[in-house]
Image (tube, grey):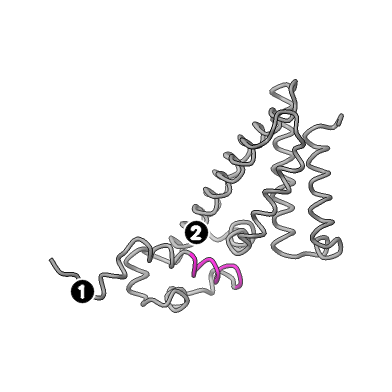
Amino acid sequence: MTTSGPRAAHRPSRKQWVIEAATELFATQPPDEVTVADIASRAEMTSAAVYYHFSSKDQVLAEAMRAFAGALREQLQSITEAQEPGSHTGAAITALLAWMAENRSAATVFFVSSAGMSQEAEALRQESRTQLLEELVRLVRKSRASVSDAEAAVNGLGLLALLETAATSQVRGDDVYRSLGHRSFVREVGDLAERIADPAR
């Protein structure tokens, strides 16, 4: 059986190209202004090749969000597992912020650009929050030998709120982020994370 040239667009790697191209566009333009033709052009593909993998632009957006959410959760799990019992929580949060800075386009799409775009986008964000909260509670438990279930849950919520706010501030480069500068911003976030996770420390 021979394969023709167009079948190359059907390879799984091409799907990732579409997601990466769309992510770059969604990070710099309002998603509702981005077209499938724009995504195809950025990925150096035809619109037909994009439609082979995705039924619509919204599906591309949802898949990009899903991929980032999964990678974010895996990164937090990896950081949590590497933490020594009783170690500082602030270091884990700043490490996660550093990872998001390295994945700025995807973080921008997830935390900023996709807000209010669709019910699927909001459902994905809520699912991700639930998973992150579970991992952050685990991180709190690892940093504190004796903490009640209720306190761990509340501290985890505090860390989640801080993480989401800090990530949004960082990718937007808002007034707070710019006035502090990157290093001071990250340091302050780490210090606050430490106070949230263990007020007595």
Query: Residue extending furthest left?
Result: 1
- On whether residue 49 falls in the magenta region, the answer is no
Give the x, y percent position of residue 155: 74, 33
Query: Which residue shows up at 71% across the image and 25% down it?
Result: 150
Towards the viewer: 112 or 148: 148
Q: Nearer the viewer, mark 2 or mark 1?
A: 1
Which picture quadrant has residue 52?
bottom left
Span shown in magenta: 20-28
Image quadrant in which the C terminus is located: top right
Please determine whether, in this image, residue 39 is positioned above or below residue 76. below
x and y percentages locating residue 30 in the rendered image: 59, 71
The quarter of the picture where residue 14 lies is bottom left
Tell me the CA gap for discs 2 and 1: 29 Å
What crowding class fits label 1: few (fewer than 14 Cα within 10 Å), some (14-19), or many (20 or more)? few
Q: Which mark is residue 187?
A: none
The answer to which of 42 and 128 lies nearer the viewer is: 42
On residue 64, the disc is 2
Residue depicted at 38% across the width and 76% down the height:
45
In the rendered view, would you say 105 is above or below 147?
Answer: below
Residue 20 lies left or right of residue 154; in this view the side is left
- Placement of the N terminus among the 4 image quadrants: bottom left
Q: Which residue is mark 1?
A: 4
Classify mark 1: helix, strand or loop: loop
**Image-based side of 35 in relation to 145, left or right:** left
Residue 191: x and y in percent read 83, 44
Q: Is residue 75 left or right of residue 95?
A: left
Dominant SS type (magenta) = helix
The amino acid pointed to by label 1 is Ser
Q: Earlier in the sequence, mark 2 or mark 1?
A: 1
Asked if residue 123 can be seen in this view, the reply is no
- Give the residue at x 34% y 60%: 12
